[in-house]
Amino acid sequence: MSSEKTPIAPGSNFIRNIVERDIEHGTYANRPWAGQPGDAATQATGTLDPAKIRTRFPPEPNGYLHIGHAKSICLNFGLARDYDGICHMRFDDTNPEKEEQEYVDSITDAVKWLGFSWDGFGTSHLYYASNYFDFMYRAAEHLIETDKAYVDQQTADEMRANRGTLTEPGKDSAWRNRPVAESLALFRDMRDGKHADGAMILRAKIDMASPNINMRDPAIYRIKRATHHNTGDTWCIYPMYTFAHPIEDALERITHSICTLEFEDQRPFYDWLLENLRDGGLLANPLPKQYEFARLNLTYVVLSKRKLIDLVENKHVNGWDDPRLPTLAGARRRGYTAEGFRLFADRIGVSKADSWIEYTILEDCMRETLNESAERRIAVLDPIKLVIDNYPDGQTEDCFAPNHPLHPELGKRVVPLSKELWIEREDFMETPSKGYFRLFPDNMVRLRYGYVVKCTGFEKDSAGNITTVHCEYLPDTKSGTPGADSIKVKGNIHWVSVPHAYPAEVRLYDRLFKEAHPGAGDRNYLDDLNPDSIKIIHAQLEPALKDANPEDHFQFERHGYFVADKKDSAPSMPIFNRAVTLRDVWQK
Ligand code: ATP
Ligand code: MG
């Protein structure tokens, strides 16, 4: 452990600088807010927005959140928290085909678990983009009426061919200059279900020769007969994401719309669209501004939705909350902490340059937060028996172990000692290697929180495996008594009393992939799966662990940080998951 304390206070970054500058200049100071999302007329009826800034976290409810999303959540909710603002929880559910309630629930769970809330200024800020379909339709008609959009009847192939390339301009569609009234009538027919899916499309009318391909008359509305989870069969036309997203931001009066770098080329269209709708009186000033940051890439992990679905559906893992998955549901079950994720987000910061973050940085954040918060307990993971031959049969006595060395106020607990104990197999060697200070014939060690014992012999089974070690204890040497220091020993081993032990299943999790960049080069990422990512063992735990509740975290002394599994644990067979080892075992 480094002795340096990590500040939890977030460091500065370019987005914070922008927010601070906007607050200083009063860019968003005089905005009315109607208390709900709405167009210019609605917002004009509002009073001064008590929120200094508005950010948003806008997932599509089509999958489980992963560690990359945690970066975005900590950034957006963290800015709102630190600058007297609010972060909206918005489900971007404009695509009718993919959304499910299961995803909505898992997403709200994960954001709350990370420690954030969308309640503020007397109200909840949980929004669904599909509630804005009426406005989006009106916005599209406005663009048509002002000759900023047209209905295109090219086939998909023609459209692709006429889009041009990075080096060649595109070509205007033959329908581009059709009369406004004709486009308007056709668009209404599209809405009324008079045309087949894909027969025509509404496009913005910008510039087919723009060097930015996203400005070459992007599609904004398509025909799609699909039942939407919220609006049912009301619509058979749906807005494209690039059209919907800026409007969602503007209706919600978002000030800083933060997204990942791949949207950088979309920013000109974002501004074009909102400025046109503002000029037409549909949206209120000041408009939201988009800022881009580098998404999280983490070594030893895949974060692509497609690969995560593949891992789950093809049973390389056991469901979305498998503790080896980088989903937030999995990480939580693994024993990772929300505090650790917040520390991680602050430590990696926010930048404009794509890079890879080492997985050990995440693990270190978990170790640091768990070291602070997790009580210590004793667990013997690979038990052999130690018999104290000179200890009275049937006797039990109390030893006292501190619950947390950094927090004496958490007190001590009783650890019962008796004649027969479980110790770790690796804490005994018949013939000690150089520098081995634990049990071997005639050597003395301290039984942690108990007595000094001297090894007097051992037994093996027919296969030559050690089954039992024998010793004698020195009655004056009990920890915490005046005689404790009378004999100095180099080894100190942990133990659990056999008659008091609490048997449990322990799941030793390790990284899901054995390569830092799964699937790099021309490898299939599945070939990089770590065959030893889980090892299930049967351990002997100290009896105090019977009181563990699901999701309680502990440091098992000398082993690492563990959590009581919240799903599979049963009173008859408790289960503990290893979150992270005490030290980095992957560093070469
Ligand atoms: P898809 O590939 O389906 O678009 P997505 O991972 O972008 O998936 P969304 O639900 O659209 O999923 O993401 C919600 C928010 O999380 C977005 O604002 C997105 O920018 C952010 N986000 C997603 N992945 C990462 C990542 N690896 N690092 C940082 N932010 C991310
Ligand atoms: Mg996305």
Image (cartoon, helix red, strand yellow):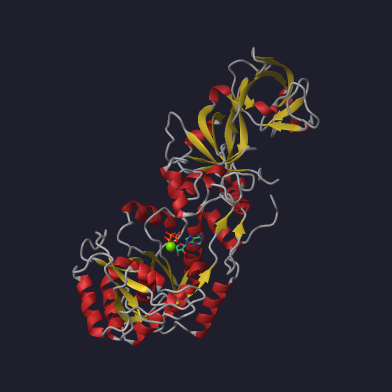
**Residue 542 x/y as whole percent:** 56, 31
* 464 relative to 565, above or below: above
* 129 relative to 499, above or below: below
**Residue 210 x/y as whole percent:** 46, 80
Identify the residue shown where x is 59% and y is 19%.
Answer: 395
Q: Nearer the viewer, residue 264 or 28?
A: 264
Quadrant of the image containing the C terminus: top right
Q: Quadrant of residue 235?
A: bottom left
Left or right for 498, reference 143: right
Left or right for 547, reference 4: left
Left or right for 244, reference 343: left
* 345 relative to 478, above or below: below
**Residue 564 x/y as whole percent:** 49, 39
Identify the residue shown where x is 43% and y is 70%.
Answer: 86
Residue at the top extreme of this rendering: 462
Answer whether residue 121 is visible to the viewer in this image: no
Answer whether residue 274 is visible to the viewer in this image: yes
